Amino acid sequence: MKYATSIVVVAFMLALTSSFTGAIAHARQAPQQNAAALPASLDDANRRAVVEAAAKVLRERYVFPDVGAQAAQAIESALGAGDYKSLDQPRAFAQRLTDDLRAIAKDKHLRVTAPGAPAGEPAAAPPPRTDGGVTRADILDGNVGYIEVAGFPNGAKDPVDRAMAALQKTRALIVDVRRNNGGSPDSVSYLVSYFVRSAERVHINTFINRNPGTETFRSTDFFSEPTPFSYAGKPVYVLTSVRTFSGGEEFAYDMQVMKLAELVGETTGGGANPGGTVPLAAGLAMFIPGGRAMNPTTKTNWEGVGVIPDVAVSSENALKVALERLGVSRAAVDIDAVSQSRVFAPRTTPQPGGEATVRRVSEELARGEPNYDLLTPQMADVTRQQLPALKQRISSLGPVQSVTFVEVGPNGGDVYEVRYANGGLRWIISLTADGKLANAGLQPLVNRP
């Protein structure tokens, strides 16, 4: 999934600026601009504009103000010393800035991005196809349930409920987050809710976020929620890897700290500072962590150290070891070798009401009059923040001429091609079970009128 060229689309795409974003993409997707916005090469003015924009954002929004100021000073000094002068390729410049910033902040979420893979390197493997973050659910030998959750997008309750319902009568469950790169803390808390033993609301996690432009902070607490049934009291294993990152790590950490599961696999990536993406200049963007997680029990998080499994094994052997600990005689490393039946797969048809939602939201944004009651709270917040720019962008395209469903994208969003009188956009949307818009992403239709 790629981000379009303007600040409008980048911000609208994120939908929740306090959400976890994985190292690979929100990624679940390291946001990127469209290649059309990227200069073929950078000059001194481009590099200066990027550094000045990045330094400003670091001083105003980084979760630790003193560290943000130090990081800003470091790249400003490097620019002044001519350290970046030879970096005329956008991707190489973005990587160098990322390296310099991380040398100060030691923060794996903090990064500068440019579209595409560096020259000479193969493109990254596409993310697994999911529905609400769920790639599959199976009943394994020995009546053991298995669910792979490769992300925690907003609006994931309905697919999670469908997958979990198919596993309700299993005697034990394996939750695989080895390929999970992050997502929304709301979705993390909802999946954890299936395993809590208390009928009362349980405090799962807290995020402390910086108020931009100040050195003050606000806290947001996340609690368990009612689920269609409870899986509490049965054995649960969570599989981890070094690729498990951000929101995937939060799930593993929460389950471990709350003594709801045993973790099997590798120590995770070590990224606990949520944030959002902002455009810089010359087609580059920066993911800026504006908050930090604080577990209510440990009063800390997994930043920089990762989540340490209870049973340390290679990620390739984690499934086999978990099955052996559950007494399954025919244990194997490959899920297909031990699956008796696959009971959930990502959908291939559009969510009901998707086309109507695209038409309605597009027309409302063009007028500057969105119906906030039909957006999730997170989506409503972002829309309010970006409404002037969104109105300008969408209204410039003119009236909607056609809306065509293309596919269910690899991350579970419905992809539509929308033709306007003066151009076209590719919309990627996700709806909640009650039809509210939970996520929306926009891309230009390349080489199309």
Image (cartoon, rainbow, N blue to C red):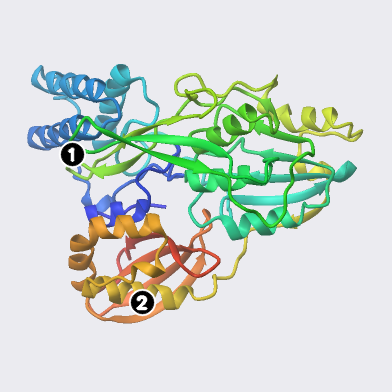
- Dot 2, crowdedness within 10 Å: few (<14), some or many (≥20)? some
Residue 354 visible:
yes
Amino acid carrying label 1: it is: Ser
Label 1: which residue? 41
Q: Is residue 126 above or below residue 80?
A: below
- Give the quadrant of residue 107: top left
Amino acid carrying label 2: it is: Arg
Q: Which mark is residue 380?
A: none
- Give the quadrant of residue 363: bottom left
Residue 449 visible:
no
Q: Is residue 99 above or below residue 328?
A: above
Q: Which mark is residue 360?
A: 2
Disc 2 on helix, strand or loop?
A: helix
- Contact? badges 2 and 1 (CB < 8 Å): no
Of the numbered discs 2 and 1, the one sitting upstream in the chain is: 1
- Give the quadrant of residue 373: bottom left
Please name the residue shown 18% across and 36% down the image. 213
Q: Is residue 227 above or below residue 240?
A: below
Please name the residue shown 33% across and 46% down the image. 32
Image x and y of residue 34, in percent: 29, 52
Q: Nearer the viewer, residue 362 or 67?
A: 67
